């Protein structure tokens, strides 16, 4: 099979971690007889510095022509620390999601047996935790009208959702639930927000189409608490853009490291596969960042974009074996830390020798 992959390494540690994922992609493709073709595009702060645009049209064309996009990270302190900047790296990410029609971000939250001691939660709380968060990506407060009042003494960000935007991700959540434990948790703030009341109204209609799936509803503040208290109670969680942004970052830390969890953004056009963490600029160029989340994002790419389940499963097996063997970066074990490139090499070699 020919695999046409757009590579958007981005900023900070992005190029380093994407390089390791590509090592594994090439190893798995060699193992299973696939032909890999890659084309690189600029994105984020790197793109601003080079062409003045965080998501240039040339990059969009590369993504549209690809079968899948492997994405690193974006962000740079020089923009984070300048609230007056008119062009920002994050604008590129939002535009990419909008132009590619990426309405759903899928973030699996799983624990790793050999790393349970690294979780901030007690072992008995997190052992066996395995749930999927679906975050709506193209609506809500991030895309609503925003600005300042005429006297510059106030500001506003409008949160807007349509029934169509809500319904399409709810249907996707139920489809995933049917493949899992048949439970969906809809997270909103319907006691306060009108958009959340629209979410709940749509969800109560759509749940009737999936009678075999158990549905419950949870306010976002309660969900934030219960993720920590009982992470094993969730199966599929679905929510709006900003709530999903916050809750998935919270959920990610129960695994023991932000550098372990992958994600996929799916929708109308080419799907994007990326780690959930940021660009970690302090570590850029030091060969210390954890590449596992990006490598597992590549596993999701094989499974979701190419429907190659066996290939994805072997990548996951290789990652688990690397952890069991203690081949981990400094965020997992400072005393016996391996380099980013060493972890990538080990996992790629395991795949080839399996």
Image (cartoon, grey):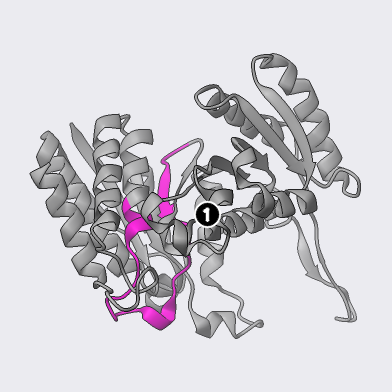
Q: Quadrant of residue 190?
A: top right
Secondary structure under tag 1 reads helix
Please name the residue that numbered disc 1 is placed on.
123
**The image quarter in which residue 290 lies:** bottom left
Is 155 placed above or below 187 here?
below
Identity of the residue drawn at 31% across and 33% down: 306
Task: Tell which of 169 and 52 is nearer to you.
Answer: 169
From the top left corner, tell me how far across and down residue 300 is, in percent. 37, 41
Image point 28% across, 46% down: which residue? 5
Residue 252 x/y as whole percent: 53, 56
Left/right placement of residue 212 relative to residue 318 reads right
Taking depth in this image into account, of 104 and 38 the one nearest to the observer is 104
Residue 158 location (% of width, % of height): 80, 57
Q: Can residue 257 be seen in this view?
A: no
Residue depicted at x 28% and y 74%: 337
Q: In which quarter of the image is residue 346?
A: bottom left
**342 shown above or below 34:** below
Q: Give the range drawn in magenta.
A: 269-295
Q: Report whether 152 appears left or right of 88.
A: right
Asked if residue 118 is among those painted magenta in the image, a careful observer would answer: no
Q: Quadrant of the N terminus?
A: top left
């Amino acid at each position: 099979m020919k695999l046409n992959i757009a590579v958007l390494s981005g900023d900070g540690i992005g190029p380093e971690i994407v390089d390791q994922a590509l090592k594994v992609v090439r190893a798995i493709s060699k193992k299973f007889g696939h032909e890999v073709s890659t084309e690189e595009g600029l994105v984020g702060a790197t793109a601003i510095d080079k062409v003045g645009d965080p998501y240039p049209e040339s990059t969009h064309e590369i993504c549209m022509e690809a079968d899948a996009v492997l994405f690193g990270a974006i962000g740079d302190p020089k923009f984070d620390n300048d609230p007056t900047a008119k062009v920002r790296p994050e604008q590129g990410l939002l535009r990419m999601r909008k132009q590619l029609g990426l309405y759903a971000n899928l973030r699996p939250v799983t624990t790793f047996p050999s790393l349970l001691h690294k979780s901030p939660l007690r072992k008995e709380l997190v052992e066996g935790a395995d749930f999927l968060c679906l975050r709506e990506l193209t609506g809500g407060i991030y895309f609503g009208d925003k600005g300042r009042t005429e006297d510059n003494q106030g500001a506003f960000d409008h949160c807007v959702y349509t029934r169509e935007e809500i319904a399409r991700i709810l249907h996707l959540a139920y489809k995933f639930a049917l493949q899992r434990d048949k439970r969906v948790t809809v997270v909103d703030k319907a006691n306060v927000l009108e958009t959340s009341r629209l979410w709940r109204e749509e969800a109560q209609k759509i749940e009737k189409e999936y009678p075999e799936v158990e549905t419950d509803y949870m306010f976002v503040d309660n969900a934030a608490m219960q993720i920590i208290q009982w992470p094993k109670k969730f199966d599929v969680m679905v929510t709006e853009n900003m709530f999903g942004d916050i809750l998935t970052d919270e959920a990610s830390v129960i695994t023991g490291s932000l550098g372990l969890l992958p994600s996929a953004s799916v929708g109308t056009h080419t799907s994007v596969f990326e780690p959930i963490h940021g660009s970690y600029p302090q570590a850029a160029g030091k060969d210390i960042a954890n590449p596992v989340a990006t490598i597992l994002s590549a596993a999701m790419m094989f499974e979701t974009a190419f429907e190659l389940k066996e290939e994805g499963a072997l990548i996951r097996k290789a990652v688990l074996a690397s952890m069991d063997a203690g081949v981990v970066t400094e965020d997992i074990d400072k005393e016996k830390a391996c380099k980013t490139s060493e972890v990538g090499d080990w996992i790629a070699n395991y795949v080839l020798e399996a």
